[in-house]
């Protein structure tokens, strides 16, 4: 009877019920594989219900804890919405290969002093006005004061994006950021380093390389099965320039033959296999 007739019992029951709905879809591998990200993210917002239930569960103590955290979250949200949201009127979209989209846009004026090793959240209103997705960006090598993203079609939203970009086009999008990543100016403390990337993970690696070009020697090991991504990168980005004092080892694991540039730089090596462990 205490469970239903007392405030503490009823609110505690609500908090106990919503807790697994908030946590399990984000941490249990089976649920992560079988529940769409948008659904899992929506369930995560049940944390608001959880917090309200706790407010009434122990009203003499919890309000301070929940209130302070909520105030910080709201302040951060308002600051980000006002200061970090930018409308890009003419973002340039183009496909690369059979499974990806490259996005180019001019940096907003507020980005003048930002580190190039950052990620952004983007929202395309012509796909969904409520979905923001995070991607690593790096300086566009073909245009000054521009950034670009490489987006692989591997989820519901990215597949919708890929299907809508049939030909190169200009479209609007909103960009939130930039936000710092682990590939910041303090990411590498030595003069020589090895960066290992797989698939579209080459984008933060390229961002890192461009940030340290001329200052440190960074060798790249890149394992990729997407031929279009390799071709797009080698044809549009001068990797030899950003690795002129180091080496780039590309391990291609896809099926079809690569359409490579006619003359590859001498410091770029391409292997049609996975990396093999060699005895030391």
Image (cartoon, grey):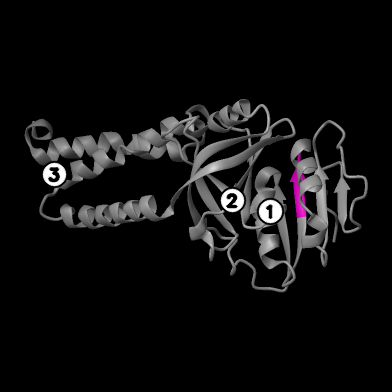
Q: Quadrant of residue 193?
A: bottom right
Who's the residue at 63% across and 48% down the image?
Answer: 148
Tell me: 69 left or right of 190: left
Residue 40: x and y in percent read 42, 34
Magenta-drawn segment: 221-225
The residue beneath circle 2 is 106
Any part of residue 275 in sight: no
On-image quarter of the N terminus: top left
Find out whether the residues at labels 3 and 2 contact each other: C-beta distance under 8 Å. no
Who's the residue at 27% across and 33% down the image?
Answer: 17
Asked if residue 224 lies in the magenta stretch, the reply is yes
Tell me: 10 left or right of 140: left
Marks 3 and 1 sit apart, C-alpha to C-alpha, by: 56 Å
Q: Which of 226/59 is in front? A: 226
Q: What element does badge 2 sit on?
A: strand
Marks 1 and 2 sit apart, C-alpha to C-alpha, by: 9 Å
The residue beneath circle 3 is 56
Find out whether the residues at labels 1 and 2 contact each other: C-beta distance under 8 Å. yes
Q: Nearer the viewer, mark 3 or mark 2?
A: 2
Tell me: 249 left or right of 117: right
Residue 101: x and y in percent read 65, 36
């Amino acid at each position: 009877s205490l469970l239903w007739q007392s405030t503490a019992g009823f609110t505690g029951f609500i908090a106990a019920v919503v807790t697994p709905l908030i946590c399990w879809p984000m941490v249990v591998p089976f649920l992560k594989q079988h529940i769409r990200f948008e659904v899992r993210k929506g369930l995560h917002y049940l944390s608001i219900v959880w917090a309200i239930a706790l407010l009434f569960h122990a009203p003499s103590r919890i309000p301070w804890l929940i209130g302070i955290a909520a105030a910080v979250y709201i302040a951060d949200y308002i600051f980000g919405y006002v200061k970090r949201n930018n409308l890009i009127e003419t973002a340039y979209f183009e496909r690369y290969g059979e499974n990806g989209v490259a996005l180019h846009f001019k940096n907003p004026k507020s980005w003048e002093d930002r580190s190039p090793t950052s990620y952004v959240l983007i929202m395309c209103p012509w796909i969904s006005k409520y979905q923001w997705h995070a991607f690593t960006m790096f300086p566009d090598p073909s245009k000054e004061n521009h950034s670009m993203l490489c987006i692989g079609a591997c989820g519901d939203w990215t597949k919708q994006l890929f299907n809508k970009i049939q030909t190169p086009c200009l479209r609007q999008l909103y960009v939130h950021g930039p936000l710092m990543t682990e590939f910041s100016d303090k990411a590498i403390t030595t003069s020589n380093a090895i960066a290992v990337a797989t698939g579209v993970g080459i984008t933060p690696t390229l961002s890192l390389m461009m940030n340290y070009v001329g200052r440190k020697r960074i060798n790249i090991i890149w394992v990729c099965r997407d031929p279009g991504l390799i071709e797009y990168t080698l044809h549009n980005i001068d990797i030899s320039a950003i690795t002129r004092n180091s080496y780039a080892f590309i391990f291609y694991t896809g099926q079809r033959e690569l359409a490579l540039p006619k003359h590859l730089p001498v410091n770029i090596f391409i292997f049609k296999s996975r990396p093999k462990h060699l005895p030391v």
